[in-house]
Image (cartoon, helix red, strand yellow):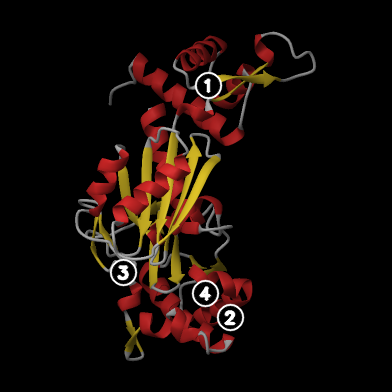
Amino acid sequence: MKTATPAMARAINDRLALDLLLERGPLTAPQLRTLTGLSRPTVSDLVERLRDGGLIEVTGEFGEDRRGPNARLYGIVPGRAHAAGVDVRRTAVHVTVADITGRPVGSAVRELAGPDDLAGLIGGAVEEAAGGHALDTVVIGAPGLVDPRHGDLVAGNEVPGWHPGLLPSVRRRLGVPVILENEVNLAAVAELRIGAATGREDFVLLWLDDGIGAAVVLGGRLRRGVSGGAGEIGFLEVDGSPLCDQLGAGVIRDLGAEQLAGRIAKAAFALVTVLDPGLVVLGGTTGRAGGDGLAELVAERVAALSLAPAEIRASAVAGNPVLQGAVLTALDLARDRVFG
């Protein structure tokens, strides 16, 4: 085992301080010393290094006297980098751009009128939302199976105009890294970070929308499978027909709450039986609309079927969970590049 070199130790300390500033907002040097356990000279050097690098700046003063270096509040320079999240659905493209602190600075929506030039439509929406800000990273969420080995769709996409080579076209237009991810996986990222699964290491998001699917999070990490097919529960046959035929939005509108809960419980039971995640979050339009009441009905039925205990919760992400998951993922990538 090798000890950390001085350069590595400085990099670790810098990232620790930057993460604290992201999490807690502006802090003084004494507060950074308390939170990190680092010495006064180490924090002093760290602050000087981060200021010289254009990563942090003085944002104000703190304390009764509000004088001297110990009263200075240091915060992340918001404009140091910007990242974009994109939600590409069958009817529209939604984009949000955030600065490196996570504050949204722009958004755009483009309706999909037809299959022509989807790459141009996505690129134009991203540029509109960026509003002139240079982007560091773009993450796109789309329905379909994304192969983690090469990061492109291999099956299942029903967005009009999506075709092989579309992703490279978007990359060429924007001139920055563009990452594609399955939309349910991104919704799971949002649930893990700011939603119903906050504080949990293991859970499954059961996506109940126009399409039926799931995202698997174990040990705090998305599990995509070798080919990206983990969670494709819509193809699973239950009672003689695939779950996508039983739980699609067009099928369930005439079902009562009890009947709907029974169908969802069979899907949740399959996930609990195989993965034992301890928590199943009901997402998508149906899960969000059903709320806590539907989650309670499903929980009762899963408890009657399963030996493994499983909590059932409704999605708790405000707004568009796919878009929020895309922004969070893009920010993670941008911060890794900028902060080290």
Task: State the separation of the CA atoms marked 4 and 3.
Answer: 20 Å
SS assignment at label 3: loop
Task: Kindly identify the amino acid type of the residue bearing the numbered disc 2.
Answer: Leu
Characterize the local packing of mark 3: few (<14), some (14-19) or many (20 or more) Cα atoms within 10 angstroms: few
Q: Earlier in the sequence, mark 3 or mark 1?
A: 1
- Callout 2 secondary element: helix
- Measure how far apart labels 3 and 1 are at the Cα level: 44 Å
Q: Which residue is mark 1?
A: 56
Is 136 on the left-hand or right-hand side of 67?
left
Q: Is residue 58 left or right of residue 129?
A: right
Q: Is residue 231 above or below residue 118?
A: below
Q: As shown in the figure, which amino acid type bears the numbered disc 4?
A: Thr
Tell whether label 1 touches label 4 (CB within 8 Å): no
Q: Which mark is residue 256?
A: none
Residue 328 position in % (x across, y down) = 46, 46
Residue bearing the label numbered 3: 158
